[in-house]
Structure formats: C-alpha cells, structure tokens
Amino acid sequence: MSAYLDHNATSPLRPVAFEAMVEALRIGGNPSAVHAVGRRARAMVDRARRQVGTLVGALPAEVIFTSGGTEANNMALAGTGRRRVLISAIEHESVARAVPDAEIVPVDGEGVIDLAALERKLADSDEPALVSVMFANNETGVLQPFADVVRVARKAGALVHCDAVQGAGKIPVDLHGLGIDYLSLAAHKLGGPTGVGALVVRGGAPFTTDRLGGGQETNRRAGTENLSGIVGFGAAAEAAGKGLDPTLRDHAEAALLEIAPGARVFSAGARRLPNTTYVSMPGVAAETQVMALDLAGVCVSAGSACSSGKVHRSAVLAAMGVEDVEAGTAIRISFGWNSVPQDIDRLIAAWRDLYIRVGKSDIAKAKAA
C-alpha cells in the first residue's frame, strides 16, 4: 500500500464521514420538504451546519454550503459589492482568476504578506475595498499574520475575505476572534468528501448572492442541498477539530536535509502548517521526483494540485523570489489525519535512493563542466 503524503491536494475520506454519508444516502429526502423524511434530512443539514461553524468559530446561521472552496471564493469576491479588491501575490487561482484586475500585494522571501505594502496600497484610494488573503498557503504551508491583516484592513475601512481551505482542520481558525468577514472552506482538505465546501459570512457583513432559485441556504445559495456531502463535511469537521501535530513533518525535514545538504525547505523561517513541507532536491527535476517516488510507493506532488496533473513553474515560489532552477526541483509533501511514522520512513528511503542515483551524479557532472 502506498504512503499517501498529498493531503493538501485531497485528504482521504475519514471513516466517520463515510459512515455519516452512508446514513444520509440511506435516509434520502429533500431538506426543503415538509414531510417526515424531509424534516429528518433538514435536521442532518442543520447538525452539519453547527459542526462546520464550530470548527471555525462561527454561528450556524453564518455558514452557507457550496460545491467547494472554489465556489466559496468566487461567491465571496463577487458578493461584497466592492469593486476594488486587493489580494496577496500567492493566492490560489480560484481567487486570482476570479478578480483579474485585483491589486497585488507582494510577499517577502518566506512568503509572508508585506503588511506595509498592504497599508500603502489601501491608502492610495478612498474607494471601499475588499482584502482577500489566504490563511495558509497550499504549497509552502505559510501562515499569514491574519490579526495584523485585519487590523490594517479595518483601519482603511476594508472588508476581509480569508481563503481558509488549507488551514481549517489543521490549526485553529476563529472567524469572530480574528474579525474576518468572509471565510472559505472545502471538505476534502480535512477528510470530508469532494464536491462540498462552505462560505462563512459574518453576521452583518454585506453579501449578495449570484444564484437565484428556490431559496435554499436562506436565499444565499439556490439549489437543492447536497445532503450526503454536507453531512460528511460536518462529520469530518467535527473530527478535525483537534488539528494536526508537526512531529512527522519535523522528522521528515530533518532527515531529508541530512541526506542532501544542498536541499532547501522553503519558508522554513516562517510560521507554517504542521503538516506541510515544500522541499527541493538539488539536481533532480520535480517531475522526476514525483514519478520516482510514486514508483517507490510514495504519493507527493509538485506544488498545487489544480492543473490536471501538469508540473509547471510555481507562482508562489516566483512571488517569493526563488530562482527558476531551484524552484524546478521542489516538491510538496503533506501529511494528514491518517499519516503514520512508517510513511515517513518510506519517504526518506525512497528520497535517499533517488538522490544517490540521480541528484549526486548530476551535481558532480555540473561541477565538472
């Protein structure tokens, strides 16, 4: 069986979520129906809404279920009524492509947003703005200083959207504690099913829906609810409440750096998710690493997993000022709820074998030339 270390792409379905989904499928029913089966379905959705809200410190009424993080991001960016949008240089494509004319706020060499630049850009205009910054980066795992982001935004009268897809369920996220207005989630990143997510809208924050229909989700997202998906999301959210431990990540990083002294763990000097390592193997292309590790029974990725399997230049590393040659040797390793020490042992052994076979020889040839 493979060592699955690509949880930032999709975390395998938790058994508790699977069981909850099977029960929901067995019951069936439309949550909008008024008969007994419909009422039972509605009760299951209401429970899931409480579970998801609890995960991020939100009230159940603030949770709008969606088809995933991409839809949640798009809904937030389109629903505030504000045309001026500022985003960080390392945002996910579902944010960056949703607002192609957004003002870009740079990040430093560790991938942390430049707060001074954000403050200056906000001061450039009196037009009401929306600031959209991700809670944790999907490639490097870097955590943004969200309390400071909100403080700077509030000073300028801006609303704040947080793409928390990668952070929720791994570390604590608190909508009201941080003062966030809009927060996006995806079930499959924390052990729930694919095809379901949520946009959490703080009570009182302006929001206009882009969907018209039967009035589901209190008229904020029309369309019959995905009952089994929502129920699975709720169960996974409750199970993920304890977060993740950094022990496996730290052990893996120490071992990989010892094998290849020229390797680099990107953003190692910043606060990061406890499960994410973005590391380079000198002299070995990322796509070679991914394929070789796969043959050795280890599943990892080369950066974001949203490009139909294509390996391409990381926009995140580019924004951090990483040179193309080094960026081209970086892979992402991400642990999750079912990762065990044996997975790390398998990763280390396969990585060592590949570096000895390919990396060392290629480096030696380059020096000789």
Image: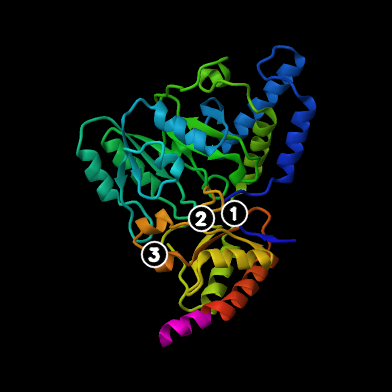
Cα distance between the residues tagged 1 and 3: 32 Å
Marks 2/3: CA distance?
Answer: 25 Å
| CB within 8 Å, label 2 to label 3 | no
Q: What secondary structure is marked by label 2?
A: loop
**Left or right: 78 as drawn, with respect to 103:** right
The answer to whether the residues at label 2 and label 1 have Cβ atoms under 8 Å apart is: yes
Q: Is residue 207 above or below residue 146?
A: above
Residue reaching furthest right? 26
Give the x, y percent position of residue 45.
65, 26
Question: Residue extending furthest bottom?
Answer: 368
Q: In the rendering, which numbered label is found on residue 244?
A: 1
Q: Is residue 34 magenta?
A: no
Q: Which segment is the magenta one?
A: 360-369
The residue singled out by tag 2 in the image is 273
Viewer-proximal residue, 99 or 274? 99
Residue 23 in the image, given as x and y percentages of width and height: 78, 32
138 or 151, nearer to the observer: 138
Q: Secondary structure at mark 1?
A: loop
Q: Is residue 228 visible?
A: yes
If you read the primary sequence from the N terminus, does the residue marked by circle 1 or circle 3 appear first?
A: 1
Q: Is residue 195 left or right of residue 264?
A: right
Please state which of the two labelled residues, at mark 1 or mark 3, is closer to the viewer. Answer: 3
Label number found at residue 324: 3
Q: Callout 1 environment at 10 Å: few (<14), some (14 to 19), or many (20+)? A: some
Secondary structure of the residue carrying tag 3 is helix
